[in-house]
Amino acid sequence: MRIHSSKWTLLVLLGCLGPSDAAGQAADAAAFTVDDAIDMVRVSGPKLAPDGTRILFVKDELDWDENERKSRIWVVGSDGTGARPFTGSADDSNPEWSPDGRWVSFTRPVGDSDRVRQLFVLPVDGGEAVQLTRHPTAVGSYRWSEDGASVFFQANDSLPDDLEEERKKGDDAVFIDEGPNGQTRGSWNGVWRVTVSLAEAPLDATRVTPGPRRIGDYAPSPDGNFLVYVYRQENRRNAGHLSEVVLHTISSGEEVQITDNDAPESQLAWSPDGRAITFGAPDLETWELDQGNLYHYDIPTGNVRQLAADTDVDIRSYHWNPGGRSVEIVALDRTDANIFRVDVRSGEVEQVTHGNGIISGASFDALHRRVAFQHASPSAPGDLWLADLSDDSRVRLTDANPDLADRNLAEPEVVRWQSTDGLEIEGILYRPARRTSPGAAVLEIHGGPAGVFTRGFDADAQILVAQGYAVLQPNVRGSSGYGDALLRGNMNDIGGGDYHDLMTGVDAIIERGVAHPDSLAVKGWSYGGILGGWTITRTERFKAASLGAMVADWRSEFGAGFNFDVVRWYLGGDPWSNRDYWTERSAYSHLDRVTTPTILFHGTEDRTDTMEQSMNFFAGLRHLGVEARFILFPREGHGIREPRHRRTLLVEEMRWLQRYVRGMDWEPPARPDEAAEKDVATIS
């Protein structure tokens, strides 16, 4: 269903709070802080037991002193009671149930100096964990066979002992884009099979796939006699389209290649009767700019057809129903993600859950009567739930952050407006609860370009709202979740129509009386940083900018951090055949137009957008006399993960906005642990 609007449409989403409740919460609760965001507990990866009685999950908590987050495997009953750690080590990860539900498998590092992650199994009703594998390299993803007699797992190939010894001595030159290497050192890998024989464990595994290959996704057949997998014979960064799907007979090693095209494939699964294979791909022939499609390969006939061909939802994950007549998918529809059911024969799509917010990580019992999942909304960060699919009744399994009940969390609004060419654009608008007149506002731009702002929990937006900023998050052309037409709306036009979508959105919230035209800021990360950098070369209306992991100059990024989508879709051609366009659409080419005070953030190990891009943008601004600051984070990649780095980013961004948007000096409150230490020192 689609709701059409005039120039400006407003949908108020109050979730579980009525208007009077929301007002009362705003009056009584404390403001959400940077440290509230840093300290949040995360729960994820629910795994529902085959009989539906228990749920495994991973609980992730902050260790501030160690500057890291530590995860442990937990278990909880289907009624939400009895939650407890399931294993005793924070090193355990990747839990799965055995098909009969009697065992839980997981991986754990083994060894002294060179610790290698191996596969363990633990009886559900008590006992010691048993090491199942003794593989020379780390066990990666793994899958139980349906009869529970064996486990398939993925692992990197090991070097011969003499070559490994030479590498340790310094013979470690990387031959870029050769063999298993891409821009950094890589390894060939494969799929292996180990028998579940606890009396003889640990056992050596048997290799299933041939080499040398780079194996992506894989799935064993229901009878355990076949393996379907995706592979490549090189590891070049921009060559994902060279992957192909292969059907492998385990006993003989015979292989049948299912695809032979210019498109990347993933998300493999077998039909319950073993007669069909499903996989995800943008297209059957070429690498289209597409939200992703689900394809059905009939093994006896070799026919391939698309499932759910007429839907605009963005499929995130799927599971075959045990009856074989349907597939349950988790899909994003505009700003909400729910569970849908696809009829395999007709392709018709039925929506199963109807909640606001984002469902993810769906895990079903053996009969698909119940499903466990993570659900997040703007005021409820990612707790786990169990739903009965017959009546959609739900049980809450976790309350990971009970202290947030005492925080004033904003409920955003879904807003729509018309861009300059008449295209309807949708976005999410957060605004301070007590704002009665136009005030400070932040325009936030998502990454991608094919990212999307959703009605999940957004800690960064809540921090801004708590400091008195409205936040507009536009889903500009190029965003996912709105169908392929909008997704392709910025092909060969980045910085064109999407820039106008941003500006008309800002105009709309000014017209509505939410934002003051003299108190605007812009921020973004990745493509948000790219389009944000472009934006401040187009206009002087923003008083401050915060740009993270950006690209400023497309031509110089071609080899260092270049991604396939720039050549294929967003700019087209290359820096030589399309020289003028690549130059003209680079913010760096227009740096002399920038007057906006700008703070930049980047990780030193970022291979998606290299840190030199931010360095050059910063140096140029300083050279031109524009207020600028650049914070570089050691060890970090395309996202900032270390807790102390993350806090620095949030604090310095807020300090910058407060200074240049509001003309005030701002300091964050001391961390709770630091404040407690000061109190103790004062008493003593």
Image (cartoon, rainbow, N blue to C red):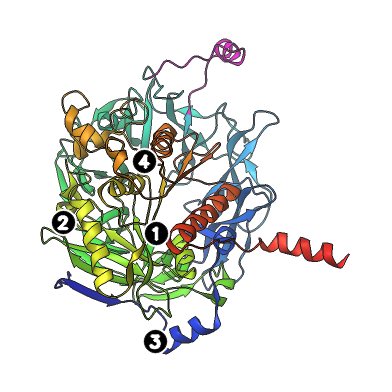
Q: Quadrant of residue 369?
A: bottom left
Q: Given the image, on which type of amino acid does mark 3 rest?
A: Pro
Disc 3, SS: helix
Q: Does any portion of residue 80 appear in the rendered image?
A: yes
Residue topped by disc 2: 345
Disc 1, SS: strand
Numbered label attached to residue 219: 4
Q: Does any portion of residue 367 appear in the rendered image?
A: no
How far from the left and from the top, in percent, is residue 390? 33, 74
Is 256 situated above or below 476? above
Q: Given the image, on which type of amino acid does mark 1 rest?
A: Ser
The answer to which of marks 2 and 3 sits earlier in the sequence is 3
Residue topped by disc 1: 360
Q: Given the image, on which type of amino acid does mark 2 rest?
A: Arg
The answer to which of marks 3 and 1 sits earlier in the sequence is 3
> Which sits in the foreground, 29 or 59?
29
* Residue positioned most to the bottom: 20
* Residue positioned most to the right: 684
> Which sits in the foreground, 383 or 463?
463
Disc 2, SS: loop
Q: Is residue 315 left or right of residue 382?
A: left
Range drawn in magenta: 156-176
> Which sits in the foreground, 581 or 68?
581
Residue topped by disc 3: 19
Q: Is residue 89 left or right of residue 395?
A: right
Structural distance between the alpha carbons of marks 2 and 1: 26 Å
Q: Is residue 94 left or right of residue 218?
A: right
